[in-house]
Amino acid sequence: MGFHKRWITKENLIMTYKSGGIDSVKGYYSADAIMVSDELCSNVLKLLNENREDEVVQLLDNETL
């Protein structure tokens, strides 16, 4: 059994959101260990853990304008 870790950057997060929406973002954050590179990625992780998907969508929509 392996250990899956993922580095999440703002650029990759926004590309993932643009290509697949919130469901892709949720899949992107599924790993055994997550390392975030900035405040946006940290905020998205916190909101997803609190099941506040609508706020994640709003936050990412504001970033992609």
Image (tube, rainbow, N blue to C red):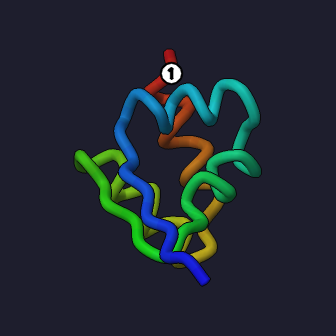
Tell which of 10 and 46 is nearer to you.
Answer: 10
Residue 14, above or below 50: above
Residue 14, above or below 52: above
- Residue count near mark 1 (Cα–Cα under 10 Å), binned few <14, some 14–19, many ≥20: few
Residue at 52 percent across and 37 percent down: it is 60
Q: Judging from the image, what secondary structure is the residue with disc 1 in?
A: loop
The amino acid beneath tag 1 is Thr
- Is residue 35 shown left or right of residue 6? left
Q: Residue furthest front?
A: 1
Q: Which quadrant of the figure contains the N terminus?
A: bottom right
Q: Position of residue 35 (x, y in %)?
A: 31, 60
Q: Residue furthest bottom?
A: 1
Tell which of 5 and 53 is nearer to you.
Answer: 5
Q: Quadrant of residue 48?
A: bottom right
Q: Quadrant of residue 55?
A: bottom right
Residue at 43 percent across and 57 percent down: it is 6
Residue at 37 percent across and 35 percent down: it is 10
